[in-house]
């Protein structure tokens, strides 16, 4: 369970967040103030420095004009220009009080010198004025540094003091406000926590503000609706319970349900009769502690313990009215949205009639397939005799004879498939494998199809890609069904003049039989279901391959089931530009090199 903080703490946390943001802004204000204060001083200091530099340049030019022997690197005109330029810069860079007066005095003495008025007194005065100009700017530089430091300290102290005072005052205000807001809400929470029964009136505290009054009114109104809804829900639950009990009693399946603790919550009459107890004596009892001595009850408990071994086991139970009946058990677990187990349902479905129908169906298919075999043989022989003399018939009679031959061949194929299905008990095939020289038997199995393929104008080629004999663990009776169905399908879809290749090869992993034809390629959407029983593709999905008589139906299903019963598998691959290749992969016999 997530622990939520009280309202007061949330308000204080919000205030501290605000203070944090306020502190950051104050810090930025301090830094910006300091930056602005410090950015002014360097500019002014740089101006003082430039004035000092100009005074030094005027002093140097003055000395060079009075002592030309010591300054011979530049001509006199250059020194005069240097003095003029430095004096002009000085007038444009006045930074200190009284600096302009000294500059005017220097200018007056310089003009007298240029006019030829020269004396030792004027030379000393010029030197003094230039020195005074330098000293004045140096003092200004020091004063700027001191003044900048004082400004920074004053800004920092003022902002810090303002921040501390603001923090203390607002903290007291927020604490008082949060207390006034949290107290009535806490009182309301205490009332709701006191487990008031539905229908009773809520005794909420007196409101101290308009918002609390609105909250009290809404809570009272909501509580009244909850009380009414609770009563309606109770009535609905009772009604649904009665409906569920009626539904459970009407279904043919035996049903029982228990909660996550194993306590029975629902049971219908069918299950109660099987257990040997009444429904009232089962509900609210623990499933594992029912007071029943019935063999059915102990058998059901055993099935539930071993339910992981088989998803839907089928077993027999003894009933008083109908004797032994076959049931299929199913267990369904109901989980909450969080994944926790809420309830378990145990259902018993009576499959006695279904199993009887399956048995009768299998017997019917067996009888039908074998009863069709003899008249079909006679009918086929008669049609073949007529076909031998069809040249003596008129054109219409010849067409009828050919139609009869085609229909008899189709019916014979269906009958053969019925016979093969009759050998498939349910979904599995029981085989009796023997170590068989496959390289000797396979050519024998192909001989009947050589005549059939020749009549269709198709060449049947056999090839063994191995130097020695190839042995396999197969059922000599049932494995030929695989070859028969593959060749029958291949002959039916192969165009006249094409070739069917049967290749036998072996390796360390598998023994492989490949049957390749040059008929139409099976479309991708058909390949996923072509091994399903009685499946045929639609016109939009398939081409001539899938619409050839008998190409898709039981034939490929028998191929797959028989191969897998031998521990092998069937693979399909399209052949370019057209054609299909079916590969039968069988395991190598144990002890074989």
Image: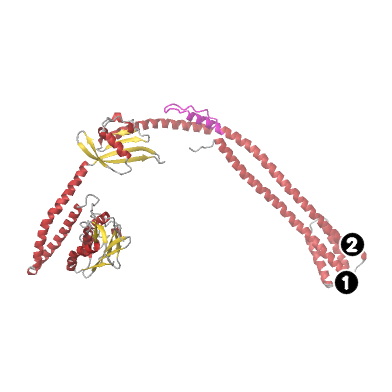
Residue 188 sits above or below residue 327 on the image: above
Q: Is residue 571 visible?
A: yes
Does the magenta run of residues contain 200?
yes
- Distance Cα–Cα, label 1 vs label 2: 22 Å
| Region of the chain picked out in magenta, as a range | 181-209
| Residue depth check, mark 1 versus mark 2: number of the one nearer the observer | 1
Q: Is residue 536 visible?
A: no
Residue 399 sits above or below residue 190 on the image: below
Q: Position of residue 8 (x, y in %)?
A: 56, 35
Residue 58 sits above or below residue 367 on the image: below
Residue extending farthest left:
392
Residue to which mark 1 is pinned: 69
Does the magenta run of residues contain 327?
no
Give the mark nearest the N terminus, 1 or 2: 1
Along the line of sight, which residue is nearer the eye, 578 or 164?
578
Disc 2 crowd rating (10 Å Cα; few below 14, some 14-19, many 20+) is some
């Amino acid at each position: 369970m997530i622990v939520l903080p009280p309202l007061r703490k949330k308000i204080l946390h919000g205030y501290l967040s605000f203070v944090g943001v306020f502190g950051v802004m104050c810090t930025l204000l301090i830094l910006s103030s300091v930056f602005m204060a410090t950015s002014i001083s360097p500019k002014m200091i740089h101006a003082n420095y430039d004035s000092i530099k100009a005074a030094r340049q005027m002093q140097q030019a003055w000395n060079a004009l009075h002592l030309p022997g010591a300054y011979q690197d530049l001509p006199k005109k250059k020194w005069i220009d240097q003095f003029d330029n430095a004096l002009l810069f000085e007038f444009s860079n006045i930074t200190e009080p009284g600096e302009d007066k000294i500059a005017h005095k220097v200018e007056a003495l310089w003009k007298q010198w240029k006019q030829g008025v020269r004396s030792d007194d004027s030379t000393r005065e010029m030197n003094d004025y230039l020195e005074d100009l330098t000293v004045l700017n140096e003092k200004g530089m020091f004063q700027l540094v001191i003044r900048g430091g004082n400004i920074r300290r004053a800004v920092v102290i003022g902002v810090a003091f303002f921040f501390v005072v603001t923090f203390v005052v607002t903290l007291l205000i927020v604490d008082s406000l949060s207390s006034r807001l949290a107290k009535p809400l806490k009182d309301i929470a205490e009332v709701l926590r006191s487990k008031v029964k539905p229908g009773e009136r809520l005794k909420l505290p007196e409101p101290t503000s308009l918002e609390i009054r609105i909250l009290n009114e809404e809570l009272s109104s909501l509580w009244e609706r909850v009380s009414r809804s609770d009563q309606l829900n109770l009535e609905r639950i009772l009604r649904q319970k009665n409906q569920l009990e009626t539904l459970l009693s009407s279904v043919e399946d035996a049903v029982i349900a228990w909660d996550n603790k194993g306590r029975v919550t629902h049971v219908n009459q069918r299950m109660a009769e099987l257990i040997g107890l009444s429904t009232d004596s089962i509900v609210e009892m623990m499933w594992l502690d029912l007071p029943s001595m019935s063999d059915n009850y102990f058998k059901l408990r055993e099935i539930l313990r071993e339910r992981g071994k088989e998803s839907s086991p089928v077993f027999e139970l003894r009933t008083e009215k109908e004797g032994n009946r076959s049931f299929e058990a199913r267990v369904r677990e109901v989980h909450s949205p969080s994944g926790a187990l809420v309830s378990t349902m145990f259902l018993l479905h009576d499959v006695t009639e279904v199993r009887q129908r399956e048995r009768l169906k299998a017997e019917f298919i067996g009888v039908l397939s074998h009863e069709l075999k003899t008249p079909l043989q006679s009918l086929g022989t008669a049609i073949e005799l007529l076909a031998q003399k069809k040249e003596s018939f008129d054109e219409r009679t010849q067409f009828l004879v050919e139609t009869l031959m085609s229909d008899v061949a189709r019916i014979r194929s269906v009958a053969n498939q019925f016979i093969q299905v009759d050998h498939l008990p349910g979904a599995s095939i029981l085989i009796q494998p023997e170590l068989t020289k496959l390289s000797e038997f396979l050519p024998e199995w192909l001989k009947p199809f050589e005549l059939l393929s020749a009549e269709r104008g198709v060449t049947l080629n056999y090839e063994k890609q191995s130097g020695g004999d190839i042995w396999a663990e197969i059922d000599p009776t049932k494995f030929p069904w695989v070859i028969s169905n593959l060749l029958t399908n291949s002959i039916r879809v192969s165009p006249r003049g094409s070739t069917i290749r049967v290749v036998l090869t072996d390796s360390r992993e598998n023994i492989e039989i490949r049957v390749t034809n040059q008929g139409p390629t099976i479309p991708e959407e058909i390949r996923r279901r072509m091994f399903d029983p009685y499946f045929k593709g639609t016109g939009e999905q398939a081409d001539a391959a899938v619409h050839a008589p008998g190409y898709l139906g039981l034939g490929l299903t028998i191929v797959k089931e028989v191969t897998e019963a031998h521990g092998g598998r069937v693979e399909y691959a399209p052949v370019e530009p057209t054609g299909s290749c079916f590969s039968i992969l069988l395991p190598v016999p144990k002890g074989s090199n």
